[in-house]
Image: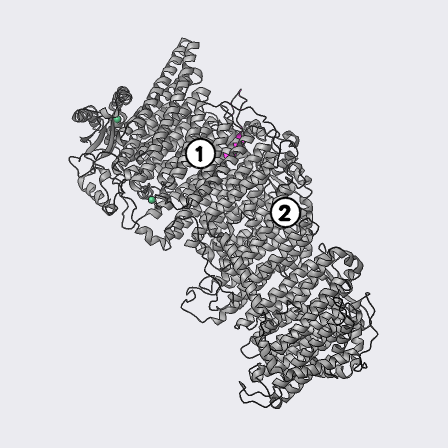
Amino acid sequence: MTHWIVAPIILPALLAPFIVLAARYHIGIQRVFSVAGVVALIAIAAGLMWQASDGTITLYQLGDWAAPFGIVIVADRLSTMMVMLTAVLALFVLLYAIGSEWDTRGRHFHALFQFQLMGIMGAFLTGDLFNLFVFFEVLLIASYGLMIHAGGNARLRAGVQYVLFNLLGSTLFLFALGAIYAETGTLNMADLARRVTLIDAGETVGIRLAAVLLLLVFAIKAAVLPLHFWLPSSYAEAPAPVAALFAIMTKVGAYAIIRVYTMVFTPDLEVTSGLHTTWLLPAALASLAIGMIGILAARHFDRLVAFAVIGSMGMVMVAISLFTPTSITAALYYTVHSTLAAAALFLIVDLVRSGRSDLRLIAQPVVPGAVLTSALFFAAAIAMAGLPPLSGFLGKLLVLDAAFDTASAAWIWAIVLISSLIAVVGFSRAGSILFWKAKTVTVSEEEPNETASPPATLSYVAVGGLLTLLVAHTVFAGPATSYMTAVSDQLFNPEPYISTVLDTPGKLSTPKEGY
Amino acid sequence: MELLVASAIGILTAGGIYLMLRLRTFPVILGISLLTYAVNVFLFASGRLSIGGPPILRDGVDFYADPLPQALVLTAIVISFGMTAVVVMIALGAYLGADDDRVDDPVDASAGDAT
Amino acid sequence: MNAFRWLLPHPLLTLLLAVVWTLLQNQISAGMIVFGVILGVLIPWITSAWWPDTPRSFHVGRMITYSIMVIWDIMVANVQVAWIVLTKPNSKLRPAWIVVPLELRQPEAITILAGTITLTPGTVSADLSDEGHSLLVHVLHTDDPDGVRDQIKSRYERRLKEIFA
Amino acid sequence: MSLFLIVALPFFGALLPGLMNSAGRQACAGLTFTVSLAAFIGLLTNLPAVLAGELVTARVDWIPSLGLNFTLMLDGLGFFFALLILGIGLLIIAYARSYLSRDDNMGEFFTYLLLFQGAMVGIVLSDNILLLLVFWELTSLSSFLLIGYWKHLPEGRQGARMALTVTGMGGLSMIGGMLILGQIAGSYDLSVILQNRDLIQADPLYLPALLLILLGCFTKSAQFPFHFWLPHAMAAPTPVSAYLHSATMVKAGIFLMARMWPVLSGTPEWFVIVTTAGLITMVIGAVIALFKHDLKALLAFSTVSHLGLITMLLGTGTAFGAMAAMFHILNHATFKAALFMSAGIVDHEAHTRDIRRLGGLRHLMPITFVIATVAALSMAGIPFLNGFLSKEMMLEEATHTVLFGSHWLVPALATFGSLFSAAYCFRLIGHTFLGPVRDDYPTKPHDPGAGMWFPPAILVVLVVLIGVAPFLAEPFVKLVTASVLGEAAEVPKAYFKIWHGLVPALFMSVAAVVGGLLLIAVFKPALRLWDAAPRPEAKTIFEALIAAVVALAERLIHGLHNGAFSRYGAIMAATVIGAGYYAWATGTVGAPTREMQDMTPMAVAGWLMLAAATLGMVFLHRNRLMSLILIGIAGLMVSVGFVFFSAPDLAMTQITVEVVTIILLLLALNFLPNRTPVESTVMRRTRDAAIALAGGLAAMGMAWHFLMRDAVTGPISQFHLANSYKGGGGTNVVNVILVDFRGFDTYGEIIVLGIAALLIYALTETLLSGPVRARLLNRKPDQPRAGDMHPTMMVVLTRVIMPVVLMVGFYIFLRGHNEPGGGFIAGLVVSIAVVMQYMASGFSWASARLRYPYHGVIGAGVLIAGLTGIGSWFVAKPFLTSDFTYVRIPPFQEFELATAALFDLGVFLAVVGAVMLSLESFSRLARRAHVKDPEHPMDIDPSRDETQAAAVKEGV
Amino acid sequence: MSFATQLMDTALIIAFIVAVLAQIMSMIRLVLGPSTGDRILALDTMVVNAIGLIVLLGIAQGVRIYFEVSLIIAMLGFVSTVAYARFVLRGDIIE
Amino acid sequence: MSGDIIMTYAIAISLLVGAIFALVGAVGLLKFNDSMTRLHAPTKVGTVGIGAFLLASMLHSFTYSEGSMHELLIMAFLFVTAPISANFMAKVNIHRRACDTPPEPPRDDTWSTLNVPEEDKHVAPEPGASHHV
Ligand code: NA
Ligand code: NA
């Protein structure tokens, strides 16, 4: 019995209350524990990823109850990869939060941070749909706390909308779960995959409703048009390290779509035919377009980055919506890229903020350290806009390549390429205003923030680290894509996953008992 | 009976959606609470309706309501309680800061310059 | 005695809790009663901070007779009020405020008096005066407010004074 | 030297100048020069192989699955371009060392320059077209940095953005083209693609691929109508202009057309598009160049024109045309770089580049004069200079080219373009260097140091050398041409010589030169005519276009994302309803499988009240207290409904949560306005009502559908019913599911609660440490408050009731596993008991006397639950595995000890802590200044002596 | 015996109907108001009636496990009534 | 056997009595036209009605199953809390002027509810507050 697989969930879940209990008034101790926890998470995630890399699917039956009666968590290539991505991202975000002292501007940052990690890890690992809902809620409520960390009017107002929107999303999730249970009598994803095949072609409405509602729920998380409205303000107003951590949150939605719609409601499943395959692609393309146009239209740097996130999620979703092994490979590659790039950009926003009176895209006096910041911005913007040589470009090539043979290739290509151009124009516009135009402005009546001090070295280390990861993602794109090809092969051959989950006996049950 | 429950879900949903679309945080929060009721009843109903069979095991009784949706709804109620408390508090914080409890947040559209 | 006080700050409450526990369990067994007493000691002990005043003298026996009398009054008055509700048109109804000057001093006694008045149909204790010397009572229907006041004082307040003597 | 190293050297070298900045300008430049030189020498080491006709290659896999690999090759064409890039690069570096002023950050400049150089080398050495794309876009990016190097100049920023936009657009379209090409050929390797001419040209996607690739080439090479960015790129420092315009950036498009020539050319599409574009560009560029007063602008448009010329030559699709093109590339690179550097010298010395303010410099800066004049005459096509030779070849080719069925169109236009070309060259010489010396130069110019004139001088030597002895260049140009043509055509036999006899090209050449001289003679009236003529300013159009796009984008984005949650919510609801309807409409419905159960009066009444409460909330929601009361009714009815349908646990949870929620809402409403104003229009309300109705119907329909049908197969809860007692030790199946079967959900659930409380606490702290604090302290009530804060009767009752409620909570906790109840409900009941105490005596009084560290309670709860789960690890069982046993200790009856109870205790503590911490937060917000904490539990206590009572009265 | 049971069943039905009627009438009062006191009173009455309904349901179904529900509703009904009233009286209910 | 019959009759009677009082409470709530008089009906009559139901339930449990004293607890709880609830609602009515102004207390200044804190005097009572909650 190995318990490592549950560790990514349990470790932060124990660390957080421990921090609340024991180190509530000692920021130093909190930091040490928080960082140590995340480092341990990386180590654990690396182990799990290594274990899963040969195709091993590890099952963990919570409470010793067999699926589908109890909750199981499952480590396969995809889930361990996402766990790894989360842990790595968390480390740099945490370093930034410490370096920039964001973690001292409100209470309980580190506890909330750990809880947030717990929620994300749980969402990636669970094999049960209702448990997925619970972890969604954990990660959401922690995200509410982090989003409004340090307070401030604009942030709280944006926070209200963010919470309200997600409450609607959670409500919808429950509707979907109700429909699924009513229709199939189960909540376990693998069991669901078996049961949907039993559904009669003359009675498909129920499962179709369930499949669509679930898709909408995940689409909200993934900020797919027209369900993306929650994102711009909340990401723009969130504290920088929080926004950076949020870069993984949209990916939870993408992950869930990949998981459920390659295993349960597969593209070739009769009873749900024509559902996600019809509407997801147009919506994804629209997200891509709106996101990139938003980069051009944004009047604030932070909102610009928020729109970039929408656009990059659109790109991920375009790839996902094709539901082929190559397109999922592309989607996964782009997911990693987009997470790192978005996080880096949000942190850079904060570096820029620390020298300016606000983030409006207008010329303001130049600040010390701007050269380094501008170089970081240039690199991150290149990555996000999908220009060579960074991973955004490679991801784009992978997506375009995967779309080549599809019926909608012309649309996909046109929108991907044109929106890239718009992003390039938008980023160059913003960059030249922020970093180039600065010199011409003499110090005007609007003094730069008096209290602002140049960012700490640790902050630059964090951003630099993320960009280094992006470079690594580019340089080692070959191994990365071949791993992701393996991931997507495993996804498109779900039988081992399903049988591992369902055919392992648990307390008081043998595998055949359920049927 | 099924019709009553289904239509109750419908009424709660409709009322919830209408209030959710109001312009002040307070009615919006209440609207979402109504939606929560609706979805809790719906989730509960996914175990179908049983009268007189609480899922408390008794000797000689073999008619029980489906316990699983009940457990799920219980979890959902608790979670939405936490969520509601949080949204109330955040909305209150936002109101106290700006003396304005409008839920719409006009995004500052001050112009940038592109030259 | 002090140790006893410390252990059992409110013996009556302990008794009450033990009875409630037995009622909750719906069965009487040695174990249950022991457990009830344990809880009956523990809970007042935990919450004693919210009982800053020392308990006053309280005659349990008189309280029981008082309770039986009140229950009887409630039953009788209920019928009267039901009759008023069902038969009296609103126009014929003569509600009135009456002021009951209080001789009782202990809050517990005043509370029981007010509760008794409210539980007895036809009258509701509405308010205390700002220094607690009078009780405001609303009467549903009466032609003789002073008579109601006098009855309250003689039938209930007098007995309560004895209970809390 | 390995090709990798040649490409990598500039890139890695680019790191150095930036880092070396502090080491001084000399070090920066020297380092840059050394790096370039190393690459240059590395390239030369491959010369023997290239001359021997070998293909030098290097390969490292990058993304094999995509077909994008780091594959390099060096053939004649690549060598030629690499030579130009690195060779002229060396001269530019030397020149820039002298040119840049002390204010310029030299490290930054050379970093960009080396990045750019590396990208260019990468383009010409790529064997993989995707890799080529990578380098292609890198040139766009690095040139963006170079053009915008002088950040303080608005023209620099605009020019850089324009260049990036236009070439970026081309690059993106080329991505499309290249991907199509690769898909047709089955490989992205050039070596493979170049073998598949017939396959590619026969493919239906050939035309799209061609168009997309040409768009990339044309934008990069500034072909009409994308020519406008190039002149604006001149805002860059002159060394950059010289580099970009002569040997590099703009030549990349030409290079690619040459590279793809074997597979793409030879079709009518290629011929018409490329030739026409080249011809138009050549003519327009020349005409505009003549009338430019800025030396660099004149040169920039001349570059446009010459690029058009080369493009046209490639477009003809003949081997001779290709050869002429290659030759002209070489010649153009030499004289154009020299000219730009000369212009830079003039600018540097005279502090102006405006031809109208110059003249007579011949006497002041003779060396510059000689260099510039020779280069300009070469560009004008004067014999014995290299420009003459390739222009002759161009005119020769033109006479053989039939475009749109016309034999004279191409020759005539070619001559016309050459005429203007000659004219602007003459103007450059005449108006800058000739004429009398003036006394109104911004500064008195003189020849600069050798550092600046030596680089162009070297180039001018080449100009003359090739012009006089063309046979020297012939083998090399033919070698290059051979690699352009590949297997598609044979290298022409024609020899490079000055005198070809009295061929038409010679007459055309003469006509051009003579016409050019005449045009200069009538320059002033011509200029007036030009200035009077209306003509579209490409830059203005571009800027307007961009502005329009931005405005459109802003309208779209800001219109859509206007911050209105009410609209977002409506869109979301409509989307969900629409998607649900779609799923419904495209599915099939069978007959119901379940009987409908009879309605009972109680159910109908419950339904009626629920409906009434909901409708009441809709219609009376503006009265907030009223809507709170109504939601209480709705919750009560839902709760009764749960009882009715056999869910006592749910009913209890629902009602307790409901009351606690209402208490929290009341606490919040204390601060909020008590009424909601009427703000939305009738139209808006109608819309919302319509959406709400649709949503209600949808939910109802869905619920009805499922209620009347059974699940597809037996629900998993059958297992729970069967094993709850056997495996979980409890008869309350719901509770066993919560703490055992699905304990992990519950674990998450209490964490949610804990986080909620932490969040509320943290937010309160933040609010109270911010500007809100002062306002809260001096807050005035919005309604008059009644007296008697802590009514006597309530306080007295609470003393009795509160312990009883606590005991009930304890009871419910213990019973949960077997009867309705459990840790969660117990936690809420206990919380309610404490709330009663708070409501009776006030929070401050109550908490001053008894208060637990609620943070700790929450933490302990979550930890206990987690540690209970971990406990099972010690018996080698998974997280949260439960165990139970039955114990008998006299006098108690046998009772059950279950680990699940410990878990439930965690739940209990988390709930209590969370509720208490939230209440505490609200209470802290409500704390007002100058209000003392009450010292008595009740306001009115006649048993206290009169003085005390008076004191309390004062305190109220 | 059978008459007695019949009578009991009839009485039960009557009690159900009456409790339901009482609920509806209370609801009407709640909507009509007019004062907040009336509304709180109506809510309080409805809570008490709901307990009655649950008790009747327990009798009708012969199930004894609704006791905890009734007890809790009784407790919470009281608390919520006091909370509403305190809100009207003082604004801050735990002041 | 006969005991059971008697018990069954007792249950039926309890139920009917409860029904009557529950109805009376609701009728009073609906019928009376003044907030204070309305307060009389349900807080007591209703309590007795539910008390009778609880009694019926208790009898029923003793007759048809193991027997239960739980109902006593609920009854006690309702009876103990009803006066406090009524007191609070009466205070609300007095505070919101939803009833006739009560006469002055003889010894003290005013009724505790009307003893509005000094700092709140400036807040004018909402016009027509009693009719709009
Ligand atoms: Na009375
Ligand atoms: Na208020």
Frontmost residue, D152 versus D940: D152
Q: Check disc 1: other Cα within 10 Å, few if <14, some if 14-19, many if 20+.
A: many
In the depicted structure, whether residue A156 falls above or below residue F62: below
Which numbered circle lies on residue D654? Answer: 1
Circle 1: element type: helix
Residue interval drawn in magenta: B57-73
In the depicted structure, whether residue C61 falls above or below residue D440: above
Which numbered circle lies on residue B70? Answer: none
Q: Quadrant of ligand 2?
A: top left
Task: Check if residue D465 falls in the magenta segment.
Answer: no
Residue D186 is left or right of residue A226, and the answer is right
Circle 2: element type: helix
Write the residue at 37% across / 41% down: D622
Chain of the residue under label 2: A
Mark 1 residue CB less than 8 A from any atom of ligand 2: no
Residue D902 is left or right of residue D68, and the answer is left
Chain of the residue under label 1: D
Residue A448 is left or right of residue A372, and the answer is left
Give the percent coordinates (x, y) of residue D350.
Answer: 56, 84
Locate the C terminus of chain D by quadrant.
Answer: top left
Mark 2 residue CB less than 8 A from any atom of ligand 2: no
Residue type indicated by callout 1? Gln
Q: Check disc 2: other Cα within 10 Å, few if <14, some if 14-19, many if 20+.
A: many
Frontmost residue, B94 versus D210: D210
Callout in the foreground (2, 1): 2
Q: Are marks 2 and 1 in contact (CB under 8 Å)?
A: no
Q: Quadrant of residue A461?
A: bottom right
Give the percent coordinates (x, y) of residue A273.
Answer: 65, 39
Instruction: State the residue position of label 2.
Output: A321
Task: Check if residue B67 falls in the magenta segment.
Answer: yes
